[in-house]
Amino acid sequence: MKSFLQLWMPLNASTHGDNVDNLIFYVHWLMLVLFVGWGIFFAYTLFRFNRTRNPKADYHGVKNHYSSYLEFAVALIEAVLLIGFSLPFWIQEVASAAAEETAHDIELRVIGQQFAWNIHYPGSDGIFGKTDPNLVDGTSNVLGLDRSDPSAKDDFASVGRLYVPIEKKVLVHVTSYDVIHGFFLPVMRVKQDAIPGTSIPVTFTATSTSPENPTKNSKWEIGCAQLCGNGHYKMQGELIVLAQDAYSTWVDEQVKLALEEGEAW
């Protein structure tokens, strides 16, 4: 089953991806058993209770409790999947990301906007500059970044391209400029709603670098998993995972441009 499903699933390039995939496989096994089981039961009822075998209707119905036992068994299995797999994973990977002391190597902000992804990097000092809602501009300053703040001088941003280093834990604060979007990194097994006025943390660690010269089909996509307007179909970006040295070089180049030009975009 696992090998079969992996033929139709995107590449897994994150440390927590196996946990997500395993849960998907378990759910598919349960659905397969239920599909086959109820299919056999349906075929049996068509044969057992057809008009020829039962010319006179029986209004008393089934007197045993087998169906109740089956329903209880299905509910029990679903409870095991929820309590034994989903909740521990959620506590470890999702709820823990909200803690201020969460250990991470890289911290970024992602702002969804019809119809693009804006990524805010804190620069070489690793400290985000001050932001002010009064400075927010949908064209030139989606972040509302205050350039008068010393910590903001080396901040920079990219639109539609998320750069991260390999084997480093990335903490991303996800929010939205306008409507609800869905921040979706298929190869990282990350999916989180981007909600206006709310910053939601997610974490992931890449285990391999992205293709250097990707084709349309091999590109690691940033998708929007929520219908967000007429241009939803084109709200796509690219996830680029670099070796640590290459990532550091890229950050230095972007910081230099930000300092020279004085603009995040």
Image (cartoon, rainbow, N blue to C red):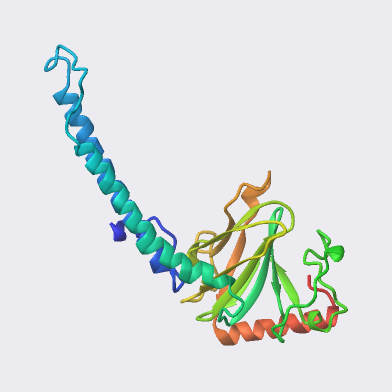
Q: Residue at x 11, y 17 (%)?
A: 53
Q: Quadrant of the N terminus?
A: bottom left
Left or right side of 155 for 34: left
Looking at this view, name the residue that lies furthest to the top: 56
Left or right side of 37 for 197: right
Position of residue 8 relative to residue 264, above or below, is above
Looking at this view, name the residue that lies furthest to the left: 53
Asked whether 51 or 114 is in front, the reply is: 51
| Corner quadrant of residue 252 | bottom right
**Residue 248 position within the rendered picture, expressed as x and y whole percent measured from the top left:** 63, 86
Q: Residue at x 60, y 65 (%)?
A: 238
Residue 7 seen: no
Q: Quadrant of the C terminus?
A: bottom right
Position of residue 27 relative to residue 258, above or below, is above
| Corner quadrant of residue 169 | bottom right
Residue 105 seen: yes
Q: Residue at x 47, y 65 (%)?
A: 90
**Residue 73 position within the rendered picture, expressed as x and y whole percent measured from the top left:** 26, 48
Position of residue 106 relative to residue 214, above or below, is below
Left or right side of 9 for 58: left
Left or right side of 187 for 142: right
Asked whether 236 or 93 is in front, the reply is: 93
**Residue 84 position within the rendered picture, expressed as x and y whole percent measured from the top left:** 35, 63
